[in-house]
Image: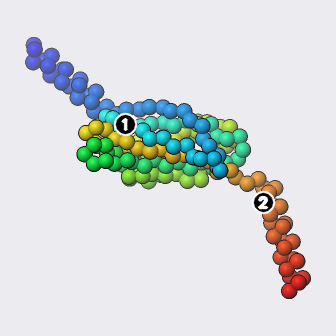
Amino acid sequence: MKLKILCAAGLLSAAVAASASSISYNFTLPVAPSTPFSERVLVSGTSFLDDWHFIAPLQPATATGSAISVDIRNFWNIDNISISLHDSLNQVLLAGLTGERSTVVNVPLVAGSSYHFQIRGNVLGPSGGSYSFVAGASPVPEPGAFALVMAGLGAALLVRRRKG
């Protein structure tokens, strides 16, 4: 009987130790020229899946995010880190490559809508793992501003042509 209890306790502890950790965070996505959002995260277990939730800026913008493994051999180590950007329906808009770092760049956002970056990886370090998450947004120029710039260039070319 004691053997059965010890075996059951051993299996339960192994299942808990081997489980994946999952944490949700909320943050404000800064728009350039503001400094990008940056956070360093410690993770444990054998794998992890973190969600970073934000609401898109109220002006047209594109989002960029990166996850970078901070490897300190024989202490912290993450393998196969990846990042993806999801909309409010959890549909993947863009996924970065898996490796020591992963990035998604210039994903168009709908103003005021909810999104989240999802970061996942395998923890190999005996003390867990560590990664840095960096995210920001770039404003998209208004179509009227683009037309004004093109008109200015056209006028400058016309003046140059008349002088030359």
Q: Which of marks 2 and 1 is in front?
A: 1
Q: How is the image coloured?
A: rainbow
Label 1, on which residue? 43
Q: Position of residue 29 (x, y in %)?
A: 60, 41
Q: In this view, does 146 lie above or below 28?
A: below
Count of number-bearing discs: 2
In the rendered image, the residue lying farthest to the front is: 35
Question: Which label belongs to residue 146?
Answer: 2
Q: Does residue 12 appear in the picture of this structure?
A: yes
First-in-chain label (2 vs 1): 1
Query: Image point 68% across, 50% down: which residue?
Result: 139
Res 149 → quadrant: bottom right
Q: In this view, does 155 lie to the left or right of 118?
A: right
Q: Where is residue 111 in the image (x, y as percent from the top left)?
A: 69, 41
Q: What element carries label 2?
A: helix
Q: Is residue 153 left or right of residue 63?
A: right
Query: Image point 54% across, 39% down: which residue?
Result: 116
Front residue of 21 and 7: 21
Q: How crowded is mark 1: few (under 14 residues within 10 Å), some or many (20 or more)?
A: many
Question: Which label belongs to residue 88?
Answer: none
Which quadrant of the figure contains the N terminus?
top left
Q: What element carries label 1?
A: strand
